[in-house]
Image (cartoon, grey):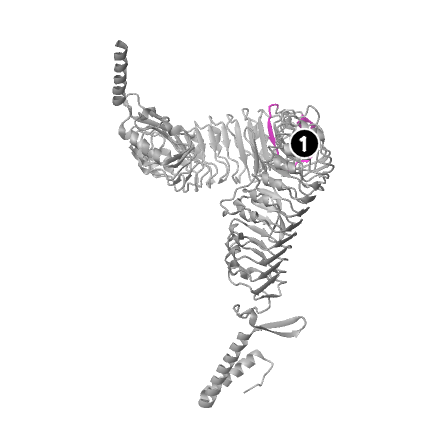
Amino acid sequence: MANQLQLLFSIITLSLLRFCCGCTEREAHALHLFKAGLNYSSNVLSSWEKGRDCCLWDGISCDNTTHHVVGVNLTGSDMKGAISESLCTLPSVATIRLSDMGLTGTIPPCFTKLSSLALLDLSGNSLSGNIPPLSNLSSLTSLDLSWNQLTGSLPSSFSNLSSLTTLILYHNKLTGNIPSSFSILSSLTDLDLSENQFTGTIPSSLSNLSSLTHLDLSQNHLNGCIPNSLGNLSSLQVMVLSDNQLTGTLPPSFSRLSSLIALVVDGNPFNQSITLLVLPSTLEQLYISLNGHHIILETLLQSLRKLEILSLSNCVLNTSTTWIPSFQLAMLYMASCKVVDGQIPSWISTQFYLEELEIAESNLVGEIPSWLLDMSLRYINLTTNHLQGHLLLNTSAWKAIKVLDVSNNALCGHIPPIWPPHIQGLFLNDNLLTGSIPPSMQVCSSLQMLNLANNHLNGIIPPSIANCSSLHILNLGDNNLGGMIPSEFGALRQLQSLVIKNNQLSGAFPCSISNCTNLLFLDIGQNLFIGQIPKAIGNLSNLQVLAMRKNKFEGSIPTEIGQLRYLQILDLSSNILSGFIPHSIFSLQAMLIEPQNGFIIFQMYFLSRRTEFIYEDELNMNSKGRDEHYTYIFSKMASIDLSNNQLNGNLPSDIGKLKGLILFNLSMNNFNGTIPDSIVQMSWLESLDLSTNHFSGQIPLGLGSLSYLGALKLSNNNLSGSIPQGGHMATFTKSSYEGNPNLWGCPLPKNCFWPEFSPPHLLISLATNEEEHIEVSLLYWIGVGLSYGVGFGAVVVSIVFTRKWGQKYFDGVDMVLKYLFPWIKNLTI
């Protein structure tokens, strides 16, 4: 009995405690309204049940004394929706963290009522609109609105946020000037306004922010000189001003920045020398670029004993051959930075801890020095220079290497048979390498990117490459490789890009490639492949680019291509394909939508401690009647090219569904029937080529409404009737229409100035010789006769009944004849 009474007492006590100490009904209701405005798939909000104390809900924290809600933290939750104004009714809330949730809409202006708010983090969402005034938030210490789509200028009310220590607004679309009133924020330690669209100069008043340790104004449109007063920021540790339009040079006062660790000012058009400057000896990271003419001497760098990262670009580096730096670098980047003698600077050999080296586009000449092979480098980029000689590797060379890029040089000889086992990216493309691909490359089990394109390699593709199971990129294009594609390639399940174009490869396309279901980019064009395109091609469900041009594929186009719902570029041109176009092609989902903001279809990244190595695929396509080389393939580049085959049949009437198509080429086939009127629905078309077929009927009238159409070829068909006028149709020359005997109207000479509505079935041919004839409308001659009769009758009447009018008539005729025939001097009537 005692136990039962004790249990009953406990239940009553807990109930009373909950009644007295739980969050208020008003706060719970406000949070429920906030929840109602969200779409969520995670379990984060499953604990938000009515009737349960909201202080026990996930992501909600309460004060232990007052039991009011003081914190809302749903960071990283998989949700969508807008921020409800109901949060503004939480009077005691001090912390709101709603970052990386996918929220949309605007920031509620009522947030200014939250007088207790100390931290507001809405970063990593898709919020838009202006930043509302937050002047009443006197307790706010941290504001993070980064990675959104906010617009407008910075509110002047920010100067009232006297407690603010952290202001993070990077990666938005904010405009206007940086307010000089920011100088009032004396407690500010972190200010990040980068990746916006701010203009104007850097306010010199920022020097009043005596507590500032981190300043980032990079990737804006700021201009003018860097204020000398910024040298007063004695607490500043990191200053990032890169990628603006700043001119002049670094202020001399920077030598007083005694706490500065990182100075990042590259990507600006500085136009004054920095040779005589003295930089703070505390620097550990220095990123600077000039305008390509100014010289950097070793005296500028000698005092930087703590320097670990040095990035020089677009300058001239002049150091003596005997110089030994006082620092030990971990990373050295010299993009477009010329060295005086064109050699890799010998002082680099003294950098025993160097991990990353980039000397790209620097006009380097000669051979790669042997001492460079002995360094423990992880990342080497010597691309786009004039390096020559053989690439010599031994068993001890570059044991730690992860990425080697020596592309676009003049290296010769064979590919070394032995490579470091942990290499991830190997770029030897655009050199003069000869011989075959060594089968021993199979030992590269960590290899993710292999580019050997545009060399003089021959022999076969070794099947052993399939043992590189981590391979994401394989580019062997533009060589002299022969044989067949190894069927073993089907084991490359991680492969995303396969380029073997412009070789001498032959045989059938292996069905095993269909096992590479992660493929995004496949280019096997300009080879000698035969047989049919396998139906298994439809298994490549992620494919975005399929290029098989200039081979000897025959048979019909497999219907299964229609299963490639992400396909945006299809090039089967210059083969021996026959039969109808499968209707499934005109339902390719990625081509049914209008293009949005263009982004590069395929990129591969290598992330190092600081650098981001990017690989981007390239492609040759027929655009506007000529072959074009596309260095970047953007998502909006939707294209179908089936030209120069033996395809026949009619075009389906629903072809207009391909609204996202930019390039469309069916030339040099055997298509017949009419051009469907629905083609005018393809409003993004830039190039349309239907030439050299058997199309008949009239040209769709709406073609002139396609505002982006810059190239049109309808020549050598059986089209008839008048050429539609208006819009872009007036910009095309007669070559767009030639070879259609029954087609007339401008720009063709036939009936160019006669009414375009003249019915073709009432035309009369007046042949003057075998090579020239004139077709005129019967209605035209009737109109001419009536006009002549009326005009002649009016003249006769005027002459007979009015002598004065008659004299004026003959005077007018006399003037016209003398103007048209000046050689008739004394003609009078």
Q: Which residue is mark 1?
A: 465
Q: Secondary structure at mark 1?
A: helix
Res. 117 image quadrant: top left
Provide residue 597's location: percent of width, then percent of height.
Answer: 49, 44
Is residue 546 one of those drawn in magenta? no
Is residue 362 one of those drawn in magenta? yes
Provide residue 759's location: percent of width, then percent of height.
Answer: 54, 69
Image quarter in which the N terminus is found: top left
Q: Is residue 324 left or right of residue 415?
A: left
Tell me where the magenta segment starts and ends, as one range: 352-373
Q: Amino acid at mark 1?
A: Ile
Res. 39 image quadrant: top left
Evaluate whether residue 741 shows in this view.
yes
Residue drawn at (57%, 26%) of the image? 330
Image quarter in which the C terminus is found: bottom right
Provide residue 143's location: percent of width, then percent of height.
Answer: 38, 32
Residue drawn at (46%, 87%) of the image? 797
Is residue 340 depicted above or below 703 in this figure? Answer: above
Residue found at the far front of this picture: 1
Is residue 663 depicted above or below 490 in this figure? Answer: below
Q: Say which of 373 and 755 sits in front.
A: 755
Q: Say which of 179 and 587 sits in front.
A: 587
Is residue 510 depicted above or below 282 in this figure? Answer: below
Provide residue 100's location: percent of width, then percent of height.
Answer: 43, 32
Residue drawn at (54%, 77%) of the image? 781
